[in-house]
Amino acid sequence: MRDRDHDEAMAELFKDDPVFAAEYLNQVLQDGEPADLLVALRQMAQAHGGVRALAKETELNATQLYRTLSPKGNPELRSLSAVLNALGLRLAVQPAHPPVAAG
């Protein structure tokens, strides 16, 4: 039996559990580096047929999407939103610190 690499294993997790995928991205956004987010999105793209399939679904240029999801990529908000939407996810904003309850 061939060992799977980390990207393949993560892609399988993301494909099988979209709630896990959303929680993972939120954790990366909270604690990780921008490059970590792009790695996770690339793994999620792999789970959904690869970057080329994702580019077709989002109507983004495949070559540009490969660059965008590279460790040195810098996605535009429009591209990021399109990718997340194609993955069944959405971008949301939350308070960095929950309000302190009075009492």
Image (tube, helix red, strand yellow):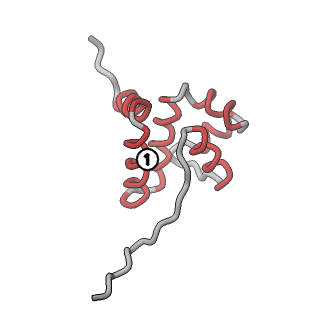
Position of residue 50 relative to residue 75, above or below, is above
84 relative to 59 in the view: left or right: left
Instruction: Tell me the quadrant of the picture where the N terminus can be found.
Output: top left
Quarter holding the C terminus is bottom left
Disc 1 residue type? Answer: Ala
Q: Residue at x 33, y 82 (%)?
A: 100
Pinpoint residue 12: horizontal percent, then vertical percent: 39, 28
In terms of depth relative to the viewer, which is nearer, 93 or 9?
A: 93
Please name the residue shown 48% across and 55% down the image: 34
Where residue 33 appears, as percent x and y from the top left, is 42, 56
Name the one closer to the observer, 102 or 93.
102
Horizontally, residue 89 falls left or right of residue 7, namely: right
**Farthest residue, direction front:** 103
Residue 80 horizontal/vertical position (percent): 61, 49
Asked where in the image residue 86 lies, by quadrant, the reply is: top right
**Which residue lies at the image location 32% right of the left edge and 87% below the top edge?**
102
57 up-or-down from 95: above or below: above
| Number of residue marks | 1
Furthest-bottom residue in this view: 103
Picture residue at 50% right of the left edge, 29% below the top: 46
Dot 1 surroundings within 10 Å: few (below 14), some, or many (20 or more)? some
* Residue 92 appears left or right of 1: right
Asked which secondary structure carries label 1, the reply is helix
- The answer to which quarter of the image holds residue 68 is top right
**As rendered, which of 72 and 31 lies closer to the eye?**
31
Decide if residue 65 is on the left or right side of residue 39.
right
Q: Which residue is labeled 1 in the image?
A: 22
